[in-house]
Amino acid sequence: MTWAIQVEGLSKLYRLGRGHGQKFDNFYQVVTDAGLALAERLTGGRSRRILPERLAARPGEIQSEHLVLSAAQFEGAPEGHFWALKDISLRIEEGQRVGIIGRNGSGKSTLLKILSRITRPTEGGFRFRGHLISLLEVGTGFHPDLSGRENIYINAKINGMTDAQVRRKFDEIVDFSELGVQIDTPIKRYSSGMYMRLAFSVAAHLESEILVVDEVLAVGDAGFQRKCLDKMLEIGNSGRTLLFVSHDMDAVRKLCTTAVEISHGRVLSQRRLEAAAAGAEAGDIQPGAGQQPVAAAIADYSLDRRMRSEREWDEAGAPRTPSGTVSVRRAWLEDAAGGVRGSYSPAEEVGVRLELRAEAASPGCRVRLEVATVTGRSLFSTSGRVGLEDAQPGASRVVRCRIPAPFFNPGAFRLGFAVADEARPGAETVIRDVLDLVVAAPGEVEAGGGGDVPLAPVFDWSS
Amino acid sequence: MSTRITTVSASRGPSLRGLLAELWAYRSLVWAFSSRDLKIKYFQTIFGPLWIILTPLITVGVMTFVLGLMIKVPSDDLPYLVFYLVAIVPWLSFITVFTQTMTSLEAHGALLNKIYFPRLVIGASYAVNGAIDFLVGFAAAVAVAAAYGILTPQFLLAMPVLLAIQMAWALGLGYFLAPYNAQFRDVKHIVPLLIQLYYFACPILYAVSLAPAWAKWLYTVNPLASVITTYRSLLNGHPLDWTGLAWALVASFGMLAWGVAVFMRKEQEMVDVL
């Protein structure tokens, strides 16, 4: 394999407190420092202000892991400075999807800025092959007085796209944003949701061999966020190199094949993420049968990226149990009145329906419903059995699962299924991300990203 | 898949060739920025782009009235309208490009902190808009000179060279000061004062012929003074100051090279300061 990014002995020195590169105190600082020192002497008390120099002067005392800076970060640094990054070496292969994780202040943002060529390293360097685009923010360079259309051009060009590329992608970007005729309205009249949609749509269509992405995906409304995650997976799967910087391990697991952990300015570990790696290779479908190549699965998503309350499969595309005797033809969400609907209030029960067809004689199958958050965090699963002993080949059967209310907190959820033959309990076919469920409090049009606690079931208590 | 390899190193800055190649790759961003600025400038205005021509015309009208008709400043045999137009048009364009480029790092702090593109692009886009402003004003000067019957072909032919000198001088000074302006906000307080002094140091309100002999060298070393004087000489038929012109060419492009070099060396440090 060839490398895409090679980082060698990269270090970055920052000054504590005041701006980097300012080699002397300015007049204002001299006066205020003198004033504070005088006040300190007069009152005999200690200044309330902790001077950064004091922190740095006693690096031996700074040892707690909970502090943002470690003692090692002061080693070899001039007084009043610290190493935000020290001696980072990394090799990222072409087509690899790498997640860079670390706590706040660990140095991951600094690394991102250096790789994005926003700031220069103090020591060492790096090289990369091909075109590199970094997304530290969406909507960079947007101007409120300009229309959505004009802002697409500016934003895409700031990100290094050529005229021809923008022209080619333009319609796709507008379609993706779902803004319709609003595209010619100055964006100062957009709602914040519309603004984010526009910004993300450009971001999702940038073309480059290497894409560096900050946690910008953590904003925006839930359905759209998911669309962008899908789009990014598409990028990863088309052989492009992805670098994703986040402190959300769930998101990294979902997107990346390798995780690089950074702590106190150093690389702590670089490891392969088995789940995502296996998913990428096996096409996001667990070993079993009914393999659907990942490209096809993604093409499927691309066809319909809207929130889906219903999904149907035709003869050829229908997922089947590993033996092939039972196929899944339709899945939908149903309210108590029997109507198909994707959005519910927390007080409403949700009905999940799955229509199965017996393709050949089969004793029956097992169906599992899997519920996850919109970012892919698995919440729970529940299974049911469908008896098909008396079903003629070609006959359909609807499986019902009722989720009583209250159960969900407001948020957006993804529903997936797994089907298995009764006779072969070990093997199953997993169909991910089939339906989207939105639970919103009354009055809210669209649910946000979902709170920390996605579920709120009521249990019986007694004493 | 492209096999172009980009190297970033702490010890070595980008090469001149790499820099030019990159600027070329980002040329469409120059247009994008300049058309954006044009749109924003005339967004929600009634006269719109008419302001490009209204600004110099109103200035020149006032000067003609006060300095020409009332004070009767000697104008080297030129009609006052022409005399002031060929000075004010380059001056306004120069000063806009210079101040915008000088504040480019500071004004785009948020952008520079989030995304990479060759920072020189911002100044270049100001130069494009400055050139548009200039050309519109120049067209007005040509029309007025033609109306007085004093238009010469040399006046038209010399314009591209004089415009290049004026732009290189403005961009060079702007790029040179941009990092210092970002780092030491003092620059912002000093520069308006210096601009005012420079306005009087340039032969805008008066002709060089009025200057005392001992101060003549000031107009030879000042590229913008040479630009203005040359425009006037090409219309009234006075002999050209070839020394001043040659020096203006060397000084302005030398300043541009120096300004770009300083800008490139300091620009990335500035992100940590902004």
Image: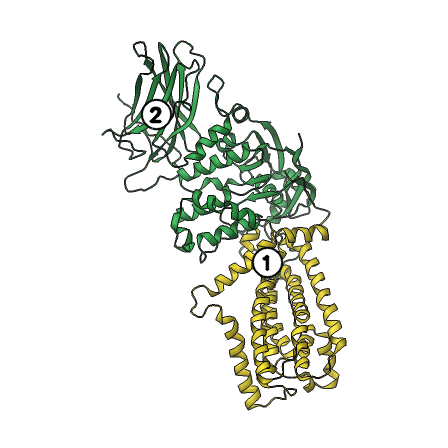
Can residue B269 be seen in the rendering of this structure?
A: yes
| Residue B48: percent from left, percent from top | 46, 68
Q: Which residue is mark 1?
A: B122
Look at chain A in the picture and name its colour.
green
Can residue B114 be seen in the rendering of this structure?
A: no
Question: How far apart are labels 2 and 1 at the CA level?
Answer: 55 Å
Q: Is label 2 or label 1 in front?
A: 2
Residue at point 52% right, 73% down? B53
| Residue A152: percent from left, percent from top | 49, 50
Q: Which residue is mark 2?
A: A330
Which quadrant does the N terminus of chain A fall into?
top right
| Residue A403: percent from left, percent from top | 30, 25
Q: Work out which residue is located at the far right of the displayed protein and give it.
A: B243
Circle 2 SS class: strand
State left or right for residue A27 relative to residue A448.
right
The picture quadrant where one finds residue B81 is: bottom right
Residue at point 54% right, 45% down? A136
